[in-house]
Image (spheres, rainbow, N blue to C red):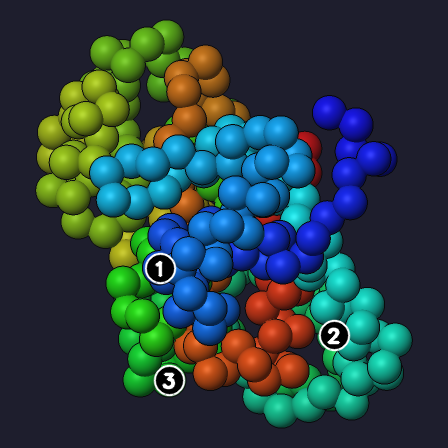
Amino acid sequence: MNWDTISFDWNQVRAFMATADQGSLSAAARVLGQTQPTIGRQVAGLEDTLGIALFERIGRGLVLTPSGRAVLEHVHKMAEAAVQISLVAAGQTQGIEGKVRITASDVFAAYILPPMLQHLRSLAPRLEVEIIAANDIRDIQRREADIAIRHVRPAQPELYARLVNEAEAHLYAATSYLSRRGRPQDKADLSQHDFINFGSTDEMISYLTPLGIHVTAQNFHLGSNSGVVAWEYVQRGLGIAFMSADIGDTTPGIERVLPDMPPVVFPVWLITHRDLHTSPRIRLIFDTLAVFLSRPPEK
């Protein structure tokens, strides 16, 4: 495909992005205020222009093809860059002010968001950002937060959700722990090791068992409902735990356990209320977060 010769119809691109974000033509039509047949024609037109299939139909829904996921990543970045360029060109970012509340897990709040917040401060220094570090699902419908970062797509039609990444998690342990207890060679070896509990022991066991990791309550002697505290225990050499690759791979003194084991893939959804998405300050932070969270982890 020669991308240099392709001329995009941005109505088709908008229809494609809305369909990908919402998961169906009908939902995309509601978001864009158009009819479902119109959205369908625009998506089909973009597929014809690119010469590839962007979606495949699974049951009553649409699922992105591998080519569709690649195209979505690029057009999201193009759209978000266009929004920020227009804001900067108009001198609006410096004048944007007010308070915005972002809710994310304590791990995301502590380890992932700080570089983004530093960049945001340079874009809009008059903004006031409050981070609500919470591992429970905050009800954005009740305006407990303006923007949420979650791993589950909300079902409420009044919420706007965008899938910004499919992140990877691996098992990690401190080098000090592995030197002391030995490095597992396969999943069976893990039954002889200590795990750090993120939440309840029963939930952890039910999560690990389908992955072929057979452990019991005897493998869990320490844990916390705080992901930050649990990760600190891992760093102190107290046991093994799953963590996002962009955190685990960049933490000094930490190694992947069973590095050849396939990763656990989890979605990262960015969520706001539909009427809030039209606010300049919410849109600025939402688009900045979308670009930031969609980047591959730094090695």
Q: Earlier in the sequence, mark 2 or mark 1?
A: 1
Q: Which residue is mark 2?
A: 121
Give the CA distance from mark 3 to mark 2. Answer: 23 Å
Q: Which residue is nearer to you in this view: 157 or 186?
A: 157
Q: Which residue is nearer to you in this view: 58 or 100?
A: 58
Residue 26 visible? The answer is: yes
**In which quarter of the view is residue 241 placed?**
top left
| Crowd tier of the residue under label 2, counting other residues whose Cα lies within 10 Å: few below 14, some 14–19, many 20 or above | some
Name the residue rendered at 36%, 13% in the picture. 184
Pinpoint residue 56: horizontal percent, then vertical percent.
39, 33
Q: Earlier in the sequence, mark 3 or mark 2?
A: 2
Pinpoint residue 270: horizontal percent, then vertical percent.
47, 61
Location of the N terminus by quadrant is top right
Amino acid carrying label 3: it is Arg
* Image-based side of 120 in relation to 161, left or right: right
Give the farthest residue toward the top.
185
Name the residue rendered at 76%, 68% in the picture. 84
Give the CA distance from mark 1 to mark 3. Answer: 26 Å
Q: Which residue is mark 3?
A: 143
Q: Earlier in the sequence, mark 1 or mark 3?
A: 1
| Crowd tier of the residue under label 3, counting other residues whose Cα lies within 10 Å: few below 14, some 14–19, many 20 or above | few
Is disc 3 in contact with disc 2, using a CB cutoff of under 8 Å? no
Q: Which residue is mark 1?
A: 26
Amino acid carrying label 1: it is Ser
